[in-house]
Amino acid sequence: MMPSLKERLDQAGIAVSEDEGEPALETPWFVRALQAFSGWLAALFLLGFIAMGAVFVLDTSVVAAMLGLVMITGAFALLRGTKGDFVEHLALAGSLAGQLLVAWALGAALGDVNAGFWWALVALQTLLALVMPSLTHRTFSAFAASLALYLALMEGISLPSLAGGLVLFSLTVLWLNEFRWPARLRTVQSLGYGLLLGLLAIQAMQYFGQSLLLGRYYTGTGLGWLEPWAGDALGMLALLLLLRYVFQRHASAVASSVRLAAFGALAVLMLLSLQAHGLSHGAVVVVLGFAIGNRLVMGFGGLLLLLSISNYYYWLEATLLTKAMTLFALGVVLLTIRWAMPRGWRAGEAKGAGQ
């Protein structure tokens, strides 16, 4: 006999109350938006007042770093105390100003914006993403850590695609373990969305051929010869991990023919990624969103797929007729896969039920 939903939730450590109380009234979105705007406006006035009296701290890196750390600590204390959208965004703005001061002090101490500078920011943003008691701040810090990682690898070893691959692999592991810690479910989700935003920004910059820092471009040194296949290799590794998770979770419902077809599609995707770089990243995020039942994650994957396909279509050295026929053939293949997948899945379920 299958356990009930309540029993399964109890086994997962999620408490279910028997009492049916009145649902809590949520604040309308426009009120929350007004509170967030008010928080940022108040923070800008406060920071402007502080800057007028403390502009001299920029002349001394030690004083700037100390003031920045004080502001970050104050934001942490404010978030630990009072809750609300106004306070959350006020603290976020104050924390961002403190982070800028710390970054200014780091740049002045190192004498240049080099790989060590960006690795220090990766460590700072990772720490803030883990300890800050605010979902908005965690999302922003995860996003900023992704961009800092991209710049650190670009500056150090000229391997930006590795940053995208590492971010993709990290968010795949994070989302697959979303329900492992029920008490920290919202925290894991906020970190996952931040990494998704970071991956989207990294891919967009790579496709458009622009630097994240305007006017600063990097020469091909270090391990640049691995570019851009290092990111695609990590994308394939993430997709293998994802398929392993799906097959283990639905072992009785997936037929062996479906497994072979999935690995065959993985091989085809790997070959396609050798030309359309980044295609595997979008496919991984789409499959991830489908596996965990998250439509927003699937939407991010769709954007990544559109970016990679559009980039390949734009740079493809072929006539417009050839491009149009290629898109037509790709559409037919995708529709065929969409038609075949539900039938193969139902066949696997019927076979598992018969056994």
Image: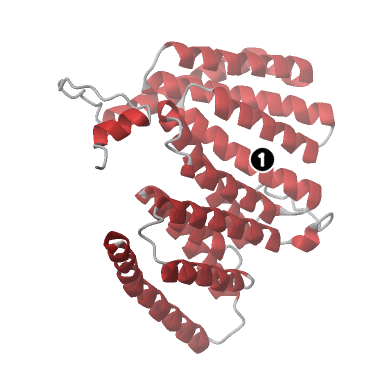
Residue 25 x, y percent position in the rendering: 20, 24
For the C terminus, which image quadrant? bottom left
Is residue 209 shown to the viewer in this render?
no
Q: Nearer the viewer, residue 77 or 279?
A: 279
Amino acid at circle 1? Ala
Residue 200 x, y percent position in the rendering: 53, 51
The residue drawn where x is 44% and y is 57% is 287
Placement of 22 over or under 334, stated as above or below: above
Q: Which residue is mark 1?
A: 148
Q: Is residue 230 left or right of residue 333?
A: right
Is residue 265 shown to the viewer in this render?
yes
Placement of 177 over or under 128, stated as above or below: below
The residue drawn where x is 49% and y is 70% is 260
Residue 57 x, y percent position in the rendering: 72, 16
Please count the marks in the image.
1
Placement of 151 over or under 13, stated as above or below: below
Residue 315 x, y percent position in the rendering: 60, 74
User: Which element type, helix, strand or loop, lies under badge 1?
Assistant: helix
Placement of 145 over or under 355, stated as above or below: above
For the N terminus, which image quadrant? top left
Q: Nearer the viewer, residue 62 or 251?
A: 251
